[in-house]
Image (spheres, rainbow, N blue to C red):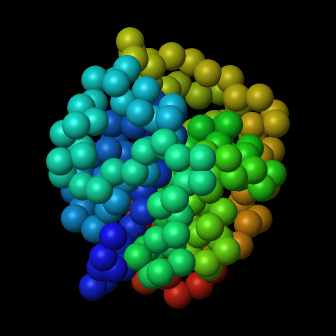
């Protein structure tokens, strides 16, 4: 892939429906985003009636299809100025917290950190009681203590800003200059 004139935003989606429509609306409003989809994200997009083919026609989409997560090399060559993971499941958050990089999304997070590229993570499970979107409508979920603790642990990571609400995600995206000039911790 040819290096862009201006670094882009890598936006990763995991297998959650939590604010998925709103996150995709934000992605589609920008012309500087490449999409990174976990295997679960590709499945969830179909469950929520999003057309992956249409997304791929509008932007570069990387899917979790290789064992080595080959697109991570783009982080080393200045293609991206920021990584956004939104929405991020508690499974993905746990893997990131414990240094497991075995999916496309967790691998790009690890590589972004190694390259000192700021990340914004919109964690799904952030309150003891939450209402979220399921394919057939709203449901109540009750995140486990470990899920909530992992979100707090992730806040301690260098170059990582954790958003616990959709409005915090929007603020983090508006905060380009501040986030890019410091470690976003």
Query: Could you say which quadrant of the image residue 54 lies in?
Result: top left
Q: Nearer the viewer, residue 125 or 48?
A: 48
Q: Position of residue 153 (x, y in %)?
A: 79, 55
Identified at 24% across, 44% down, the residue is: 55
Identified at 61% across, 21% down, the residue is: 141
Q: Is residue 125 above or below residue 138?
A: below
Query: Could you say which quadrant of the image residue 99 lies in?
Result: bottom right
Q: Position of residue 45 (x, y in %)?
A: 36, 30
Q: Position of residue 133 (x, y in %)?
A: 44, 24
Q: Nearer the viewer, residue 118 or 3?
A: 3
Is residue 36 shown left or right of residue 181?
left
Identified at 40% across, 51% down, the residue is: 62
Quarter the N terminus occupies: bottom left
Q: Is residue 24 above or below residue 73?
A: above
Is residue 70 shown left or right of residue 159?
left
**Extreme top residue here?**
136
């Amino acid at each position: 892939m040819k290096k862009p004139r201006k670094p882009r935003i890598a936006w990763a989606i995991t297998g959650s429906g939590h604010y998925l429509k709103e996150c995709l609306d934000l992605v589609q409003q920008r012309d500087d985003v490449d999409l990174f989809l976990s295997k679960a994200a590709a499945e969830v997009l179909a469950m929520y009636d999003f057309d992956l083919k249409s997304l791929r026609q509008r932007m570069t989409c990387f899917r979790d299809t290789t064992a080595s997560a080959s697109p991570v090399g783009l982080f080393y060559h200045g293609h991206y100025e920021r990584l956004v993971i939104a929405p991020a499941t508690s499974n993905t958050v746990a893997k990131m917290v414990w240094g497991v990089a075995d999916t496309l999304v967790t691998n790009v997070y690890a590589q972004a950190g190694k390259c000192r590229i700021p990340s914004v993570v919109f964690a799904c499970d952030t309150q003891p009681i939450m209402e979220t979107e399921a394919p057939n409508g709203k449901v109540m979920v009750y995140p486990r203590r470990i899920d909530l603790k992992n979100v707090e642990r992730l806040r301690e990571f260098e170059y990582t800003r954790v958003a616990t609400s959709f409005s915090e995600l929007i603020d983090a995206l508006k905060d380009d200059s501040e986030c890019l000039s410091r470690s976003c911790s």
